């Protein structure tokens, strides 16, 4: 029993040090993936200056080989559209699916368009016959994806990425998973003990107690803070080094950005995906600005993506006294289903001295 409690204590110290919850580390993004390549993978790979603006294709497959979720997207072969009922036959002929992404001024987004590439079925190129793929169980030389540059009338292969190239091992998550497997094995006949050993909810409270004297900000304050004066005359500096910039939210808010964002989405019960996607960009920018405001720097270090999302001019469509006209205009923007336009709209409301609670409630309720 002493050994088990000692192992639990090691995990507690790890969670405090990493400033993450047990479930965050247990259910990391790789284990929650539906496809072999997702937008986070694409961002990590083509964000660097090595990849210029343009359209890129990633060989991509659902991990369970169920393509139903992809049928609503548009498929092409030799730049010609094909019908949904044709794609099963093409996959059976060893065609592979090339998932297209656009990089423009360091903004990367999915085009929701696929090309079929002959002789690039994932099983064919790996000489396997999987019906379901568990990435953790693949050998290091298994080809996860191929990266192509899509040019006029030409598809150019850039890289072939194996699991070893593609997967960055998360040693912390592995330690959490190994602990979970071991405790499940040791406590098969003692459910109460197992529940205790896998319950780390007390860590959040402990973290609060430990950090009472630290200079931590509350993300809830961002939702009620009036940013109008700042947004209307934003000043930019490059004060932070890259490592400091990347970790600034964790340092000043006591948690990773994704975790803070997820909690807000849940708390405010935001239903529209387009509002969620827009909020993700705006909230990070405001959190970084808030740090500089509170530390009396008054100039803001934002990367090119965050900076470019802040509109430099006011939207005349919101300069009317008619609430009906404003509602009609905002509904039209929402129907366009372009989240960057919603990002712009959120900033326009911020300029007019609204806070984020009002903005997300208004847009999600239209």
Image (cartoon, grey):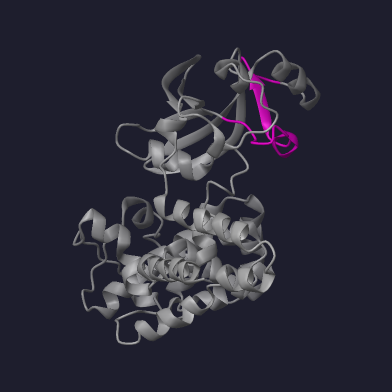
Magenta range is 60-81
156 sits to left or right of 180: left
Q: Specify whether 141 is left or right of 215.
A: right
Position of residue 256 measured from the top left corner of the image (x, y, whole percent):
42, 64
In front here: 162 or 243? Answer: 162
Most extreme residue toward the right is: 85
Q: Which of these two is toward me, 97 or 139?
A: 139
Residue 190 at x, y = what percent? 67, 69
Of 91 and 339, the residue lying toward us: 91
Picture coordinates of residue 284, whole percent (x, y): 41, 64
Instruction: Residue at 45% x, 65% y: name it.
Output: 7
Q: Is residue 234 magenta?
A: no
Q: Is residue 65 magenta?
A: yes
Q: How many marks?
A: 0
Evaluate whether residue 362 shows in this view.
Answer: no
Q: Which residue is located at x 52 percent, y 73 percent? A: 200
The quarter of the picture where the C terminus appears is: bottom right
- In the figure, is residue 254 to the left or right of 264? left
Residue 192 position by quadrant: bottom right
Residue 212, compared with residue 137, is above or below; it is below
**Which residue is at 37% across, 43% downward?**
106
Of 240 and 95, which appears nearest the observer?
A: 95
Please, which residue is most extreme toward the front here?
Answer: 1
């Amino acid at each position: 029993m002493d050994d088990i409690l000692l192992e639990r204590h090691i995990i507690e110290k790890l969670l405090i040090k990493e400033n993450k919850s047990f479930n965050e580390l247990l259910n990391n993004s790789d284990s929650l993936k539906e496809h072999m390549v997702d937008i986070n993978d694409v961002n990590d790979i083509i964000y660097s200056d090595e990849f210029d603006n343009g359209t890129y294709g990633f060989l991509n497959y659902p991990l369970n080989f169920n393509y139903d979720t992809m049928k609503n997207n548009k498929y092409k072969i030799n730049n010609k559209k094909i019908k949904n009922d044709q794609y099963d036959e093409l996959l059976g002929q060893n065609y592979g699916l090339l998932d297209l992404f656009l990089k423009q001024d360091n903004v990367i987004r999915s085009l929701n368009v696929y090309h079929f590439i002959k002789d690039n079925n994932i099983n064919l190129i790996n000489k396997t016959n999987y019906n379901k793929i568990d990435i953790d169980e693949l050998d290091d030389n298994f080809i996860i994806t191929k990266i192509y540059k899509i040019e006029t009338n030409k598809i150019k292969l850039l890289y072939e990425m194996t699991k070893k190239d593609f997967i960055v091992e998360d040693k912390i998550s592995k330690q959490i998973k190994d602990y979970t497997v071991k405790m499940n094995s040791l406590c098969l006949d003692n459910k109460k003990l197992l529940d205790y050993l896998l319950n780390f909810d007390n860590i959040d409270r402990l973290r609060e107690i430990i950090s009472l004297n630290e200079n931590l900000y509350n993300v809830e304050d961002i939702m009620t803070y009036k940013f109008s004066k700042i947004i209307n005359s934003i000043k930019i500096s490059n004060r932070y080094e890259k490592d400091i910039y990347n970790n600034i939210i964790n340092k000043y808010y006591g948690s990773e950005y994704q975790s803070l964002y997820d909690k807000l989405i849940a708390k405010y019960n935001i239903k529209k995906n387009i509002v969620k996607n827009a909020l993700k960009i705006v909230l990070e920018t405001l959190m970084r600005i808030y740090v500089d405001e509170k530390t009396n720097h008054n100039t803001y270090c934002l990367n090119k993506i965050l900076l470019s999302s802040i509109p430099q001019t006011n939207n005349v469509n919101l300069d009317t006294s008619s609430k009906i006209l404003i509602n009609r205009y905002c509904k039209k923007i929402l129907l366009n289903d372009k989240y960057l336009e919603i990002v712009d709209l959120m900033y326009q409301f911020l300029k007019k001295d609204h806070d984020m609670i009002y903005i997300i409630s208004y847009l999600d309720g239209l």
